[in-house]
Amino acid sequence: MINDLRDWLDIVEKKGQLRRVNGVNWDLELGCFATLNARSKSRPALLFDEITGYPRGYRVLTGSLLNPLLEAFTFNLGEVSSTEELRSVLRERIPAWESTLKNFPPKVVHSGPILENIQSGRDVDLLKFPVPKWHDLDGGRYIGTGDSVITRDPDTGQVNLGTYRVMVHDRNTVGHYISPGKHGAQHRQKYHSRGESSPVAVCVGHHPLMFGLSCLTVTGGSEYNYMGAIRGEPVEVIEEEITGLPIPAHSEIVIVGWCPPGITRDEGPFGEWTGYYASKKHPAPIIQVERVYHRDNPILLGSPNAISPSDDSYHFVLFQSALIENDLAKVGIPGVRGVWLSEVGYQQLIAVSIKQAYAGHARQVGTLVSQLGRGAHMNRYVIVVDEDIDPTNIQEVLWALCTRSDPEKDIDIIRRTRSSPLDPMIRKPAQAFFNSRAIIDACKPYEWIDEFPEALKLNPELVERVKASKLLDL
């Protein structure tokens, strides 16, 4: 079993999916490499070493979930190499994982590689690690981008792992920004409402499976349980001495401390997944770091945002598309051929392909998708297309939009739906975060579907024969 990031790196490199990059600067240059890699054709993982100002062996990994091969290997999905196949396998595996969550609670152990080095009190210095400044206008260096922030609900004891941004203020203080409504924010608020500091552990170097689950919205159990179900064996954790939180025994770097009520420091701005600095510098909670655990020659896992495609966009849209499609199946919606969150806009643009079965089918699907799971958070457009349209192909989706919809008849607007402080269309400061969303019916009109003009098509056999001729590079 692959327990840690180093085992993962060894196998990924043998698969030809890792590139080593030496001698770059943590100040903007590393982030630029990561962003350009996310826009490349092959999109391998990048492992940076010999980073300016830091000793050899203090490394940063980006692009850990950027392509189908990396995603399939990380999530134990077998030899899957295409997005279409990967989406199909994921749809089948997710219910299987969810049905066994209770069988894989984390296993408490008393030692592990994470305990190789321990700094406490005055010895803590977060900038001993090569923390990047990812974007030109970022308010500081962000140690938490591909992280897993570990919190516990003080009422239920439920442990949550979430990916939230963490900015270094000084050697032992970090900013602790979480969007409203997220589980980590709910846990923190419960402690603060009682006048208590919230215990927090921030894992910033780990197996990409942990990052992959932390940035999703999972239900039915802790992300630790999901990791166990996917791996087929429990995740080993250590009950951290100061906070009591379960930290991964095989992680690379974990920082722990307390988030006190009523104490803030200016945080941000930070270049977010929307492709904008969505909010200006503003007061945000802090974590007073009391201890840092790390392995020898530690690896920081980074995932910088950018105008899509970005470092985590492929993983995000793949998983959320599968989850939404499964949600539609659970509520009994027939005829769904595929769901895809475009990498252009994450959940802000969702395409759904259906085989129309009855009048109103397209509007029903569009409305549900706009409110199901990730579609309920900061979505803007849901475009419903016929079964002959590939929802993963933005050109086909836009062609259907242009030729099968009438703006007067086929666009419905839902108002005052859930948005986020990261929404660039909300003027800040704001007391509440609402947006609207458009449901666009880009299907052939149901009442005269059989009369709709026939689309141009190439004969598949002819296409293969032309390609085989090699007269053109097609």
Image (cartoon, rainbow, N blue to C red):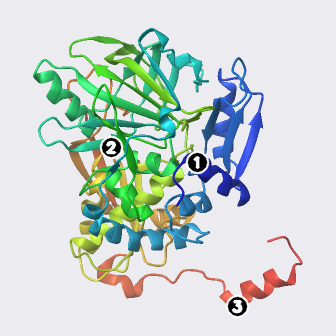
- The local secondary structure at tag 2 comes to loop
Query: Which of marks 2 and 1 precedes in the sequence?
Result: 1
Find residue 359 and report its image quarter.
Answer: bottom left
Q: Residue at x 56, y 47 (%)?
A: 5
Query: Total number of numbered labels?
Result: 3
**CA distance separating discs 1 and 2:** 25 Å
| Residue located 69% across and 20% down the image | 54
Q: Is residue 281 visible?
A: yes
Q: Which residue is mark 1?
A: 64
Image height of 357 relative to 237, above or below: below
For residue 461, which numbered disc appears in the image? 3
Name which residue type carries label 2. Met
Q: Position of residue 49 (x, y in %)?
A: 72, 32
State the image coordinates of residue 7 (x, y, percent, origin top left): 61, 52
Q: Quadrant of the C terminus?
A: bottom right
Q: For numbered disc 1, what is the local secondary structure?
A: loop
Q: In which quadrant of the rendered view does residue 406 lie? A: bottom left
Of the image marks 1 and 3, the number of the one nearer the N terminus: 1
Name the residue nearer the viewer: 386 or 141.
141
**Mark 3 residue type:** Glu
430 left or right of 112?
A: left
